């Protein structure tokens, strides 16, 4: 596979290969800011022209705002362009946002979503090369190189995770094991027998892998595994500490989404000061989700991304629903790519209980702050006589479980207090036996919302005794 080839502007500067993490594909990571802005502007103008000329939805929206592609004269003009949202992809299902003829499109991916129609995304040959190049840059930033053996436990198929990581790892020159998701016992055997040095999967699945390995008598800490690249769901610093401690590895957060390209939009470097965005291909903005106005640097809001080089399906100002903030680039790794704060919340994940906004990540942090609790939990929402209740089931370690009743009561009280203080809400905590909460082989499903189910206590639904 040919790598995405740098443009003339990008070739101006060759950074010193100061760290082992340097890979020739990483050159744009170190582009001085003025050159990066120049490159972004020329690509932004090109992508807006392309979208306007080829995608009716963009043309109609821009016409409605009386903006023409030639009105984009500087980067700030992006703020005048209309947003794109997820429902636009559903409403134009399957091919309505494509900007390339099918002759030029070489791959389709799709995401099922939880409700309604799936969304479909398309790639030209050039798009796939860009995707591979950003994945190479992501893996190189984590310190992976051609000597690594990478176990890719992201699902292969319509989901972008599997193939995205696969082509990146292969192009890096590393050895890829395309094990895909599931079959946990085999995953543990592969990790051990093939002397795997890096793992790609969701953080939730890695927590499960660690636990299963221990049950099988395999100590992951004693294996050659040294790096994990985890993504496809929001996760907290508490989970990172758990993974690093239990697995004896360094855990990196990778960010991406199918609508934009798949994995490879942003990555942590070994300094873990946020995620460097590959902003030569993905232009980031952070907006106030209510007003749509840009947030000042460093302040939290919704991440909006524009694909600067995408051919088959360019997206202008796509609202990701992910909550983050942008910072100026000043990382000791030397990358000039602007970092964003890691995403621990998605506005889609938020639920409201008795008027209070709650994110699962807040509950997770409160649980993991208490010793004796495990990162396996479930949030159950119910409604009784119009009043919402929030129950949190938390799995406990076998040690605490076999302990005296007194220890269980203390743990129960500490968890209840910790979660109630974090949320400012009354919650009911239930301690669950070890291994009693179902494990996920992909993204975790933390919240079960039963509030709209018909209550069995409702007399009108109680079946009459049979005659
Ligand atoms: Zn860095």
Image (tube, rainbow, N blue to C red):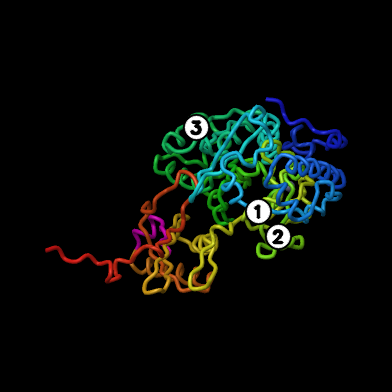
**Which span of residues is magenta-colored?**
392-403
Label 3: element kind: loop
Residue that numbered label 2 is attached to: 287
Q: Is residue 234 visible?
A: yes
Q: Quadrant of residue 464?
A: bottom left
Residue nearer the viewer, 114 or 68: 68
Circle 1 residue: 319
Q: 453 and 223: which one is in front?
A: 453
Label 1: state its secondary structure.
strand
Please give the name of the residue rendered at 71% of the width and 36% of the height, measured from the top-left corner: 311
Spatial separation of the CA atoms under disc 2 and disc 1: 9 Å
Q: Earlier in the sequence, mark 2 or mark 3?
A: 3
Expressed as whole percent of the image width and height from the top left, the position of residue 189 reads 45, 33
**Residue lying furthest left in this view?**
467
Taking 330 as reference, is 392 above or below it?
A: below
Q: Residues within 10 Å of mark 2 (few under 14, many from 20)?
A: many
Mark 3 — residue? 179
- 10 Å crowding of disc 1: few (<14), some (14-19), many (20+): many
* Quadrant in the picture for residue 17: top right
């Amino acid at each position: 596979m040919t790598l995405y080839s740098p443009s003339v502007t990008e070739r101006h500067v060759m950074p010193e290969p100061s760290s082992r993490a340097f890979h020739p594909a990483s050159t744009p990571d170190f582009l001085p800011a003025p050159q990066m802005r120049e490159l972004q502007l020329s690509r932004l103008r090109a992508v807006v022209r392309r979208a306007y000329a080829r995608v009716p939805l963009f043309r109609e929206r821009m016409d409605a705002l009386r903006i023409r592609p030639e009105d984009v004269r500087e980067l700030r003009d992006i703020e005048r362009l209309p947003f794109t949202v997820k429902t636009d992809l559903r409403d134009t299902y399957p091919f309505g946002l494509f900007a390339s003829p099918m002759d030029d499109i070489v791959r389709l991916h799709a995401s099922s979503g939880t409700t309604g129609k799936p969304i479909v995304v398309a790639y030209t040959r050039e798009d796939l090369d860009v995707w591979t190049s950003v994945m190479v840059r992501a893996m190189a930033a984590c310190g992976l190189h051609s000597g690594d053996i990478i176990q890719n436990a992201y699902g292969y198929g319509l989901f972008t995770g599997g193939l995205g990581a696969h082509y990146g790892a292969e192009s890096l020159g590393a050895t890829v094991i395309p094990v895909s998701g599931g079959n946990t016992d085999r995953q543990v055997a592969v990790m051990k027998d093939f002397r795997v040095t890096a793992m790609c999967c969701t953080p939730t699945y890695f927590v499960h892998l660690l636990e299963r390995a221990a049950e099988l008598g395999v100590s992951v800490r004693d294996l050659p595994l040294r790096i994990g690249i985890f993504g496809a769901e929001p996760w907290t610093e508490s989970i990172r500490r758990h993974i690093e401690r239990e697995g004896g590895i360094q855990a990196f957060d990778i960010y991406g989404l199918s609508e934009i390209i798949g994995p490879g939009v942003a990555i942590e470097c070994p300094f873990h000061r946020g995620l460097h965005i590959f902003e030569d291909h993905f232009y980031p903005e952070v907006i106030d989700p209510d007003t749509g106005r840009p947030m000042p640097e460093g302040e939290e809001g919704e991440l909006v991304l524009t694909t600067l080089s995408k051919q088959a399906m360019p997206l202008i100002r796509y609202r990701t629903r992910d909550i983050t903030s942008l910072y100026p680039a000043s990382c000791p790794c030397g990358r000039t790519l602007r970092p964003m704060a890691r995403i621990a919340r998605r506005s889609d994940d938020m639920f409201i209980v008795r008027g209070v906004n709650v994110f699962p990540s807040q509950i997770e942090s409160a649980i993991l702050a208490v010793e004796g609790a495990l990162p396996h939990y479930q949030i159950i929402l119910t409604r009784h006589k119009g009043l919402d209740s929030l129950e949190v089931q938390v799995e406990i370690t076998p040690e605490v479980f076999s302990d005296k009743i007194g220890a269980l009561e203390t743990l129960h009280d500490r968890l209840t207090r910790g979660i109630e203080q974090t949320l400012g809400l009354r919650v009911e905590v239930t301690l669950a036996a070890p291994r009693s909460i179902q494990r996920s082989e992909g993204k975790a499903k933390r919240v079960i919302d039963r509030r709209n189910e018909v209550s069995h206590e409702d007399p009108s639904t109680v079946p009459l005794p049979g005659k």
